[in-house]
Amino acid sequence: MTVALANPAAQACAFVLGCAVIHAARAHAELLTRLLVTAIVAAAVLLLLAASLTYASDADATVDEVSLYAAS
C-alpha cells in the first residue's frame, strides 16, 4: 500500500469501526448519545481554542484606533 492511500484507508477503517461500535451499542442509545454529544462539544471547544490562539494578536502589540478600524 502506498503512502498516498494509507491515510484514506485509515479513515475508512475508523469510520467502519465507529459504525460497528454504534450498532453494537444500540441498546444503550441514550448513554451513547450523551457520550457523542460530549465528544462533539469538546472537539468544538478545542477547535475554537486553537483558532483563537492562531489569530490572537501579539502580547507586545499596541491597539490604537487606527489599527483597530483598519483591521475591520
Image: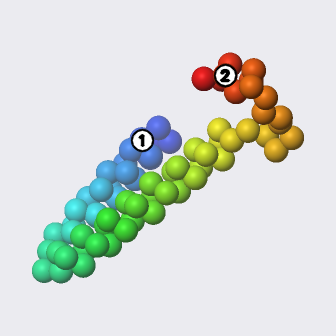
- The spot of residue 57 in percent (x, y) is 73, 38
Residue 5, quarter of picture: top left
Q: Is residue 5 left or right of residue 57?
A: left
Q: Is residue 35 left or right of residue 23?
A: right
Label 2: which secondary element = helix
The chosen color scheme is rainbow
Q: Can you say which quadrant of the picture contains the C terminus?
A: top right
**Residue shown at 53% from the left, 56% from the top:** 46
Q: In the picture shown, does residue 35 fall above or below 52? A: below
Out of 59 and 19, give the one closest to the viewer: 59
Q: Badge 1 is on which residue?
A: 5
Q: Amino acid at mark 2?
A: Tyr
- Disc 1 packing (10 Å; few <14; some 14–19; many ≥20): few
Label 1: which secondary element = helix
Q: Amino acid at mark 1?
A: Leu
Q: Badge 2 is on which residue?
A: 69
- The spot of residue 4 in percent (x, y) is 47, 38
Q: In the picture shown, does residue 40 fall above or below 56? A: below
- The spot of residue 44 in percent (x, y) is 44, 54
Of the two numbered discs 2 and 1 on the same chain, state the one appearing first in sequence: 1
**Residue shown at 50% from the left, 42% from the top:** 3
How many numbered circles does the render carry? Answer: 2
Q: Can you say which quadrant of the picture contains the N terminus?
A: top left
Q: In the picture shown, does residue 53 fall above or below 41? A: above
**Residue shown at 39% from the left, 65% from the top:** 39
**Residue shown at 24% from the left, 78% from the top:** 31
Q: Is residue 33 left or right of residue 57?
A: left
Alpha-carbon span between mark 2 and mark 1 = 47 Å
Q: Nearer the viewer, mark 2 or mark 1?
A: 2
| Residue lying at the far left of the rendered structure | 27
- The spot of residue 63 in percent (x, y) is 78, 33
